[in-house]
Image (cartoon, rainbow, N blue to C red):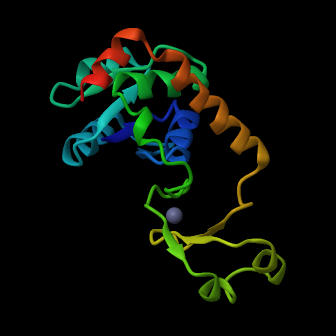
């Protein structure tokens, strides 16, 4: 599942990436270019712009209902049944590339001595070269991820439970 996110929805794009989803985002882009990219890269367009959805004839779209990014994230995960695919911190928030594990020994010269001492696991972005480590992300972010994942439990319906048991 790959997304392209309308320039109005930066926070949604960022949070999809934090949760590990492939979500490209351009802060400035012409509608026609956005639609071309969506088609070329087979991405589902997420937008709150009904005019844009009308123009998007040959690509999949999802109209984002809420103005609140928390609700937006929930809507996307529900719409495409993506809760079980959430993998926080597996993707670069800046450039959308999938992060690669970096052995601690190789991180030594790439981070400050303080970070090297404090962190145990490191990851390298093959796209932009950034190094991430546990602690890169603010405590608020971890709290927020837990909060988002709690919504998953809340929405489990009895019908869904029955379906799952059959497998
Ligand atoms: Zn990157």
Q: Is residue 18 left or right of residue 159?
A: right
Q: How many marks?
A: 0
Q: In this orientation, which residue lies closer to the viewer: 55 or 24?
A: 24
Above or below: residue 162 compared with residue 100: above
Q: Quadrant of the N terminus?
A: top left
Q: Hey, which residue is sitting farthest right in the picture?
A: 114
Q: Hey, which residue is sitting farthest top in the picture?
A: 158
Where residue 115 sits, quadrant-wise, is: bottom right
Above or below: residue 9 compared with residue 42: above
Where residue 46 sits, quadrant-wise, is: top left
Q: In this orientation, which residue lies closer to the viewer: 124 or 9?
A: 124
Above or below: residue 166 compared with residue 111: above
Q: Is residue 1 left or right of residue 127?
A: left
Seen at 43% across and 45% down, the residue is 21
Seen at 55% across and 48% down, the residue is 88
Horizontal and vertical percent for residue 125? Answer: 51, 69
Horizontal and vertical percent for residue 134? Answer: 69, 62
Q: In this orientation, which residue lies closer to the viewer: 163 or 22?
A: 163
Horizontal and vertical percent for residue 104? Answer: 64, 82
Q: Quadrant of the C terminus?
A: top left
Where residue 145 sits, quadrant-wise, is: top right
Horizontal and vertical percent for residue 79? Answer: 36, 22
Above or below: residue 75 compared with residue 141: above
Q: In this orientation, which residue lies closer to the viewer: 116 or 3?
A: 116
Q: Is residue 6 left or right of residue 123?
A: left
């Amino acid at each position: 599942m790959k997304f392209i996110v309308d320039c109005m929805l930066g926070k949604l794009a960022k949070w999809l990436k934090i949760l590990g989803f492939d979500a490209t985002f351009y802060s400035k882009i012409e509608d026609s270019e956005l639609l071309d990219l969506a088609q070329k890269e087979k991405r589902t367009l997420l937008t709150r712009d009904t005019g844009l959805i009308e123009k998007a004839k040959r690509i999949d779209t999802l109209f984002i209902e809420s103005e609140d990014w928390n609700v937006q994230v929930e809507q996307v995960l529900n719409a495409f049944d993506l809760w079980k695919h959430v993998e926080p911190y597996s993707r670069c928030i800046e450039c959308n590339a999938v992060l690669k594990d970096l052995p601690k020994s190789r991180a030594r010269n790439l981070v400050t001595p303080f970070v090297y001492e404090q962190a145990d696991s490191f990851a390298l972005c093959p796209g932009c070269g950034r190094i991430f480590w546990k602690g890169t992300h603010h405590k608020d972010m971890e709290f927020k991820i837990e909060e988002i994942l709690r919504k998953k439990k809340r929405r489990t319906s009895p019908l869904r439970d029955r379906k799952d048991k059959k497998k």
